Amino acid sequence: MKPYLHKVQYYETDRMGVTHHTNYLHWMEEARIDFMDQLGFPYGEMEENDVLSPVKSVACEYKHPSTFEDEISITVAITAFNGVVLALTYEMLNRKGETVCTAKSEHIFLHRDGRFVRMKRELPEFCKVIEAVMEAKE
């Protein structure tokens, strides 16, 4: 999978000229959406088919500051999937190859009415792709 690239915008920085910590969460979402596109399961199409994927948990560890006009490369990897919860990790590097942030998130799959999506029954193709990506990583 190709890393997602994000160029730090001026409005994403604070008075000290450093990227405000909340922006990394936005970048994680951008990278996750791009990752889903690369898997062949665009999130917009999943929503059109009544499948939502809210965040169950999120954690970030900030390693090195980023600033205006830095280009951040975000690599997304699947760490676990049990048919209910999808766990992802993110590694964010600047152009120098310095890690600016490592993070992880967990997502569940729900119908709009709040019922859990039975992924293996309702989206077996998605499960196969996720499992294949996880196997290729090993």
Image (spheres, helix red, strand yellow):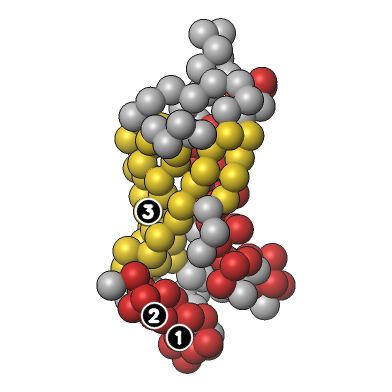
3D distance between C-alphas at marks 3 and 1 = 19 Å
Q: Nearer the viewer, residue 78 or 56?
A: 78
Q: Residue at x 67, y 77 (%)?
A: 49
The residue where tag 2 is placed is 131
Disc ID at residue 128 = 1
N-terminal of the pair, mark 3 or mark 1, is 3
Look at 49% across and 89% down and name the residue there. Answer: 124
Task: Say which residue label 3 marks.
Answer: 89
Element marked by disc 2: helix
Taking 46 as reference, is 102 left or right?
left
**Residue 79 on image: x %, y %:** 32, 64
* Quadrant for the C terminus in the image: bottom left
| Secondary structure type for disc 1 | helix
Label 1–label 2 contact, CB within 8 A: yes
Relative depth, front residue between 115 and 78: 78
Q: How many marks?
A: 3
**In the displayed structure, would residue 50 be above or below residue 77?**
below
Q: Amino acid at mark 2?
A: Glu
Question: Is residue 1 placed above or below 21 in the rendered structure?
Answer: below
**Percent of width and height locating residue 127:** 45, 82
Q: Residue drawn 59% across and 67% down?
A: 38
